Image (cartoon, rainbow, N blue to C red):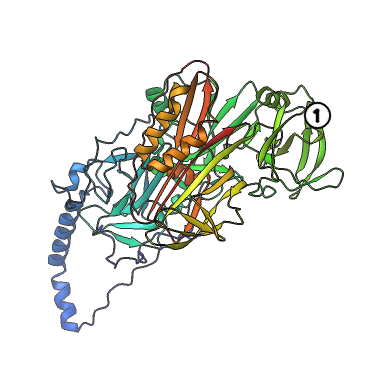
Amino acid sequence: MNNELPQTDANTSLTSSPIVNHPDDARAVPVEPRRFLTKTGLVILLLANAFFIALVLAYVVYITSSQLGLMEDPFLSSDPADWNLPDTTIFEDDVVSMPDTPVLYPDSNSYLGMYENVVSQPGVEWFTHPLLLSGIDYAYLLNNFEYEQLNFYQIGTYNGTPIVIADYSITEMGTAYEYAIYVGTPTSTVYRLANHTSKGFIGQMVADNERILIDTQTEFSALMFRPVLGDRLIPVEAIFASYGSVQGMFANSEYSADYRAAVFPEVSQNVEYEFIERTPYGPLYRKSIIQPEQGTAMSAFVIRGVGGIQVAYGYRPMTFVSDDRVPQITWSDGTQNMSRYRMDGLGSCGGGGPEVARERVLEEDLQYSGMTSDGRAVYSVINPNHKLIERVFAVTNGRVYTYDEATRTTVEREVTRAEMIEAYGVIIIENDLGEQMIFTHADYGPQAECGKPVIYLYPEATTTVSVSLDALITKSEPLYDNGWTVTAHPDGSLIHQGVPYESLYWDGYGNGQYPVFDKGYVVRTSEALALMGEHLSQMGFNEKEIADFKLFWVDHLPLTPYTQFSWIGTRGMNEMAPLTVSPRPDTVLRAFVDFKGLEEPISLPPQQLNKIERKGFTVTEWGGIIRQ
């Protein structure tokens, strides 16, 4: 038996493998047998030597299986030592040495019956728990990032040939995940499946071994993540691979009880984890971050996929809410809603939600107020003493802020609870799971915007450059009209419609998800700007950019004795407020600071700050959050 996959050229598919393209199409593609033209004598001769040929074939199968570490077992040996791997790496000098041996935390759950609904495929067997592989090099890191680790785990077999996932997490002031699926062993032909590779896996960070062949068509049904829970939850796939966001291994995440016990045994009582149901891809789990004083919660969902991988899921987007955060609502009086609302609680400049009622709002506290464009009833909170009203005034002290376009200044005014209620200040709309989703009027909640993000452009030669953001822009300089088009010079100077500028400035709200910080810095407020400047220098910002940053933020720091702050880096900003620049820059460096005042210092583990080398056409951006 030859367990090596059919030989093909790069960028071709395994068309002869019984791997199907959809769960409903489980037909194997037959391999066309070779045809031989024989004569009667040859037939007799072959029959006479059949026994000898059978012995030869048996010997070949034995040798091939031994080389692959398969032996008599139709699947890969559980001990990578049986793979007969070379003693030295198969790469040359550009290989970055790996950090310490990667850790795979134990996962004692047997998951008995949890994968009964997973669609089967001929020749494909999935492991229940992943097998951590050491010394395996399907791909390698291009740059020496000490905080990076490229890990390999076997998660199943195809006709005895290993199915391996390569993944790494980017801990750049937040965490992002990249992954790829390979079929084969390092001592045989190996294919990387393009349809099971995240968009950022191959690029500036990671490269395939030159022996790897690329398969652009093959798909594993169990890895083709689609909506679950009656199509009410969808895979998070906006910036990742075709079929969902793989977030490393379940055993190494907070959703695993063993991991929680080992890493942070004192789990907050305000965080709950629960099993929801079995799906065609594995068991579905939910994490709820509870705000008991407000009676609300924010949820995240994952599926523990085959082989123990973790896949992120989320609510299906509401069709009545557009990117400008203006819900399409017809109010009871027949007027159309023109106001912006927040779905992420009293959050920040990106989306952290959606927020739902942990304790259902009672009918006596609600009043029917209208209908969404997709037919959902809208209720407004009319009890002035309800938690959802009280929390707003507890944060704002009854003061709201509006921006005066004429004077380009922010105007403060007082507001009453009655005024807020009359303006539909807090409304409730049920989502597809029957949960009460909470929408807070942007004019009455705490105004927290992305404060003065400033974009600098440094082309290698004078160039016409177009810049756009996936964000709700509330203020800009020069005027943001579906983007900016400027003439950019190598020294960073810009010309927009004949007017010179040093940078592109904007305020507003990002459309992506805002991170939750568990790392950062706490310093005396008098020392905060100096430390922020040091951090910006570590990241790669130049002296002018750092000076501009300090000049702006010196008047916006808290008045408290201490300041707590955390950074969002380039990848985090690309998720929260994606930036598009044409022509495409060679280097993009983005940093965003989130800070708040403290009366007393607290202890926080520091973030990993990573330097980006500025090469070629460079785009930089700094910004922060303004909590008014």
Which residue is at a point 24% across and 41% down the rendered structure image? 98
Name the residue nearer the viewer: 323 or 14: 323
**Image quadrant of residue 44?**
bottom left
Q: Is residue 386 visible?
A: yes
Q: Position of residue 172 (x, y in %)?
A: 39, 39
Disc 1 target residue:
382
Task: Answer with left or right where residue 334 lies relative to residue 413.
Answer: right
Name the residue nearer the viewer: 115 or 440: 440
Q: Residue furthest top?
A: 600
Name the residue nearer the viewer: 320 or 462: 462
Task: Answer with left or right where residue 266 lies relative to residue 610.
Answer: right
Q: Looking at the figure, which quarter contains the C terminus?
A: top right
- Please, is residue 241 above or below residue 398 in the view? below
Q: Is residue 511 visible?
A: no
Which residue is at a point 57% across and 46% down the rendered structure image? 506
Q: Position of residue 359 (x, y in %)?
A: 68, 26
Q: Looking at the figure, which quarter contains the N terminus?
A: bottom left
Q: Position of residue 347 (x, y in %)?
A: 59, 33
Q: Residue furthest front?
A: 499
Q: Position of residue 341 (x, y in %)?
A: 69, 40
- Give the residue type at disc 1: Ile
Q: Label 1: how many residues lie within 10 Å, few (<14), some (14-19) or many (20+)?
A: many
Q: Residue furthest right?
A: 333
Mark 1: which secondary structure? Answer: loop
